[in-house]
Image: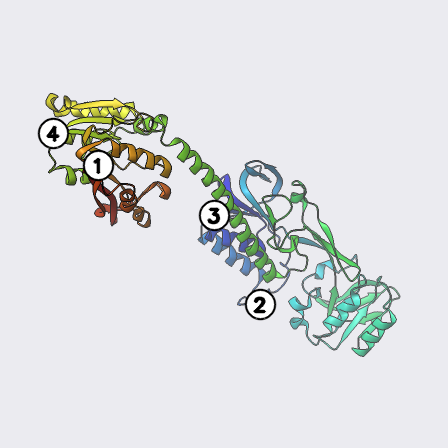
Amino acid sequence: MGDRYDVVVVGGGAAGLAGALALARARRSVLVVDAGGPRNAPADGVHNYLTREGAPPGELLAAGRAEVTGYGGQVVTGRVEAAARDDAGFTLTLADASVVRARRLLVTTGLVDELPDVPGLAKRWGRDVLHCPYCHGWETRDRRIGVLATGPTGVSQALLWRQWSDRVLLLVHDAPQPTGDELEQLAAREITVVDGPVEELLLAGDTLTGVRLADGGVVELDTLVVAPRFTARAGLLADLGLTPVEVELGGQVLGTQIPADAGGATEVPGVWVAGNVADVRAQVITAAGGGLAAAAAINADLVAEETREAVRERRHQVATMFTEQAWEQRYTSRAAVWSGRPNPQLVAEATDLTPGRALDVGSGEGADAVWLARRGWRVTAVDISRTALRRAAAHAGDAGPEIADRIEWIHADVREQPPAEAAYDLVSAQFMHLPGDERGVLFARLAAAVAVGGTLLIVGHHPWDLRTSVHRMHLPEMMYTPEELAAALDPTVWEVRAEARPRPAVDPQGRESTVHDAVLVARRRS
């Protein structure tokens, strides 16, 4: 078990495991903390769960755990004793004193069935003392069924159970007497009304045979139905400021649950609930569906948070990436940033040009400037990073004094210190990517620096490259097509070639790919 997760799920029943499975499949780090003792443990099987009809509860949970861990989720047995919320998420303290942190919480702690205080009743719970006809009606069909009324809903319970058996009795116990209309309904459905409190359950060995009334009378039964009070296990949620609310039906309080929206979100940001803690009526399949819905909502919430953070980081990156400090940090973080080879499009275009004066803008570690100097050019190499210029000068020195003497290294930000106009026979800007407005201004200044008969060469990453798996900084607004560059030049002044040139590349996984350079070659006519 680690100490930090995207989501911690408290409770490992159907709701918790279904939520954890969806989150794990969404590639979230998820931990399920389960205290054990599922509510339906006494039952022989889970019913109305499509494809799992009749599966023993323990078998269903074991399969669920295996599915969660199969996708990388973690499941541990333990009890969360305390929870606290802060700006970073939630801190949970377990019974063994271990502490885990979570960005989000999904609480699926279920409920407690509070049963009437009738001797022997609790021991038979889930076996032949039942409450849900959809869970157990088929298994008790055509048997003698006694409905122990615990409030005004006793009559409607008896009428409902009549669907499964024609031998249903209503044990009024301590509930209000049925009204005249209710008595008529019961009589019409041939449901016998038995007055008087129930004192105890009667057994023959390990089989329910009936109940004894306070007046000593015996009612023979095979099954006893009772509506317990369903109380949400919400102690942990109280630490976070969440209070259960009462749930009523027909004037009778059925129990309590934590209020939440359709996706399980509570009023406390970052906390979701699912299963019986959020819905006292939820059967196993309903609880699982609630866990899935909550997981989807949690993942969407995390995606929204991550997107907001990514936008903040991107804005900061764009605002700072073109500063001298940012480039210094980039160069000083590595012994070499670039390959040391001249850019291929410069080689392709300048090889046949007559050497003259060249301006290398954003000269980096000097490979282009040294290549030009070798071919007889006198080069002005400009860069914003002093570290890059020192490396470039050393590179030129290694090439020999006759090469080094042909290059002037200038530390400058060309956005603030534009080059002299009409001063160069070749102006080269290789892979200079700036925001659109800044780029337009700078490239216009570079064009103005070209002498009559000279060449402007601008090369950049084509936006098509973002469609490939080759790594490119994802700044589409700073990439450009050759057609965009050409459109900014007056065709009466410039003879222009604008091309998207393919070249082979290898992506980070070692796969061969093709990238495209946006290439503008423009010769100044006048």
Q: Are marks 2 and 4 in contact (CB under 8 Å)?
A: no
Mark pair 3, 2: CA separation: 32 Å
Pointer 1 residue: 456
Mark pair 2, 4: CA separation: 84 Å
| Mark 3, other Cα within 10 Å: few <14 / some 14–19 / many ≥20 | some
Q: Amino acid at mark 4?
A: Arg
As helix, strand or loop, the secondary structure at mark 1 comes to strand
Q: Are marks 2 and 1 in contact (CB under 8 Å)?
A: no
Q: Point out the tag, 2 or 4, that comes first from the N-terminus.
A: 2
Q: Amino acid at mark 2?
A: Gly
Pointer 3 residue: 28
| Mark 1, other Cα within 10 Å: few <14 / some 14–19 / many ≥20 | many
Q: Which mark is residue 116?
A: none
Q: Amino acid at mark 3?
A: Arg
Q: Point out the tag, 4 or 3, that comes first from the N-terminus.
A: 3
Horizontal relation, residue 415 to residue 128: left or right: left
Residue 192 visible in image = yes
Mark pair 2, 1: CA separation: 78 Å
Q: Point out the tag, 3 or 2, that comes first from the N-terminus.
A: 3
As helix, strand or loop, the secondary structure at mark 4 comes to helix
Mark pair 3, 1: CA separation: 50 Å
Relative depth, front residue between 387 and 163: 387
x then y, percent, for residue 246: 74, 53
Q: Which mark is residue 374?
A: 4
As helix, strand or loop, the secondary structure at mark 2 comes to loop
Mark pair 4, 3: CA separation: 55 Å
As helix, strand or loop, the secondary structure at mark 3 comes to loop
Q: Quadrant of the C terminus?
A: top left
Rendered view: 82 above or below 423: below
x then y, percent, for residue 130: 70, 64
Pointer 2 residue: 54
Residue shown at the point (10%, 29%) measured from the top left: 376
